[in-house]
Image: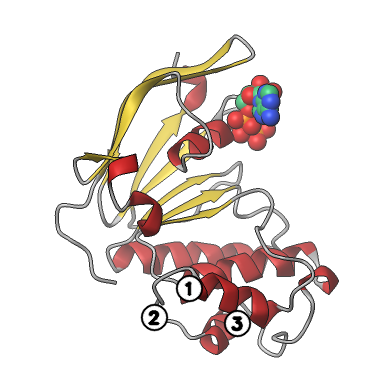
C-alpha cells in the first residue's frame, strides 16, 4: 500500500437528523494512517447513518468531510475506501471466486491473491461454491477477503463481528491490526468489546454528540 504522507480524514461540524430526530450534531474528528476509530452508541443512535454519510450514500444536514484537505467528492476518497455494511455486499448467485474477481476488476489489487485471501479467512477450497450456499459467517468472511485482495487505505466496517464465531472475531481483530500497522485506517461500529491492544484507537460515543 503506497500512501501519501499527508492523507487524513477530517470531519468538521457534521450534523444529521432522520425523521426530524437529531442523531448527531457538531461532530468533529480526524483520522490519520495507523489509526482506528470505534463508533459506539445505543441502537438507533446513528452509527450506521454516520458511516453511510461518510461513504457518500447519504448527505449530512450540515458540516464537511475532507480527505487530504479536499472535500471528499473532489478527492480520491471513494477510490481509497472500502465499505463493508450490514449486508455483506456479495452477489449470491456468483461463486466465491467470481465475487472476488469482480471486486478486483473494480479496484487496485492489494497484497493478497484471491487464493491467499481465502486461505487467510479460512475459506480455502470454497472458490467454486455459490455464495448463496454459504453460511452467514462464511459470507462475512468473503467480504473480509474482498478487503484483502484490494488496496484500500480506509476500511469502513459496520458491525463486522456479526455472525462470526470466536475464531472469526479474532481474525478480524488481526486483520485490523495488520492493516493499520501498514499505514491503513479503519472506522468501525461494534457492540462487541474490541480487543485491540497497542493500537491507536479513538472512540466516539454517538449518544453524547447532540
Ligand atoms: N431507511 C431509514 N429510513 C428512516 N429512518 C431510518 C432509516 N434507517 C435508519 N433510520 C433511523 O435513523 C436512526 C439511526 O439509525 P442507525 O441505523 O444509524 O442507528 P445505529 O446506531 O446504527 O443502530 P444499531 O446499533 O441498532 O445498528 C434510527 O432512529 C432509525 O430508526
Provide the secondary structure element on which disc 3 rests: helix
Q: Is residue 205 above or below residue 160?
A: above
**The N terminus: image quadrant:** bottom left
Q: Do labels 1 and 3 touch, CB within 8 Å?
A: no
Tell whether label 1 touches label 2 (CB within 8 Å): yes
Q: Measure the alpha-carbon separation of dots 1 and 3.
A: 9 Å
On the image, numbered disc 1 is attached to which residue?
148
Please state the horizontal and vertical placement of residue 166, each as a whole percent of the image: 67, 64
Identify the coloring.
secondary structure
Badge 2 is on which residue?
A: 111
Q: Is mark 1 within 8 Å of ligand 1?
A: no
- The residue furthest top is 20
Q: Is residue 100 above or below residue 170?
A: below
Q: Residue at x 65, y 73 (%)?
A: 99
Res 149 visible: yes
Rendered image: mark on residue 118: 3
Give how far across and how far down residue 198 sits, in percent. Answer: 33, 57
Q: Which residue does the image show at 49% across and 33% down from the upper left? A: 50
Give SS at disc 1. Answer: helix
Q: Residue furthest left?
A: 5
Count of numbered labels shown in the rendering:
3
Mark 3 CB within 8 Å of ligand 1: no
Q: Residues within 10 Å of mark 2 (few under 14, many from 20)?
A: few
Q: Which quadrant of the view contains residue 146?
A: bottom right
At a point 33% along the width and 61% down the height, the residue shown is: 184
Q: Earlier in the sequence, mark 3 or mark 2?
A: 2
Viewer-nearest residue: 156 or 92: 92
Which sits earlier in the primary sequence, circle 2 or circle 1?
A: 2
Label 2 element class: loop
**Residue drawn at 44 percent across, 71 percent down:** 150
Figure quadrant of the C terminus:
top left
Amino acid at each position: 500500500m503506497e500512501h501519501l504522507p499527508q492523507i487524513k480524514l477530517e470531519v468538521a461540524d457534521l450534523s444529521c437528523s432522520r425523521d426530524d430526530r437529531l442523531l448527531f450534531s457538531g461532530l468533529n474528528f480526524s483520522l490519520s494512517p495507523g489509526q482506528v476509530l470505534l463508533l459506539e452508541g445505543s441502537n438507533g443512535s446513528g452509527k450506521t447513518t454516520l458511516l453511510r454519510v461518510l461513504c457518500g450514500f447519504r448527505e449530512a444536514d450540515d458540516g464537511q468531510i475532507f480527505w487530504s484537505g479536499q472535500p471528499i467528492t473532489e478527492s480520491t476518497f471513494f477510490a481509497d475506501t472500502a465499505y463493508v455494511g450490514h449486508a455483506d455486499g456479495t452477489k449470491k448467485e456468483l461463486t466465491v471466486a467470481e465475487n472476488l474477481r469482480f471486486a478486483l476488476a473494480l479496484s487496485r489489487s492489494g497484497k493478497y491473491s484471491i487464493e491467499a485471501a481465502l486461505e487467510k479467512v479460512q475459506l480455502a477450497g470454497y472458490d467454486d461454491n455459490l455464495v448463496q450456499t454459504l453460511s452467514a459467517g462464511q459470507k462475512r468472511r468473503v467480504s473480509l477477503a474482498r478487503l484483502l485482495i484490494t488496496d484500500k487505505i480506509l476500511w469502513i466496517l459496520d458491525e463486522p463481528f456479526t455472525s462470526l464465531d470466536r475464531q472469526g472475531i479474532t481474525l478480524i481483530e488481526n486483520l485490523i491490526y495488520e492493516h493499520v500497522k501498514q499505514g491503513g485506517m479503519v472506522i468501525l461500529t461494534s457492540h462487541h468489546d474490541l480487543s485491540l491492544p497497542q493500537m491507536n484507537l479513538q472512540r466516539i460515543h454517538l449518544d453524547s454528540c447532540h
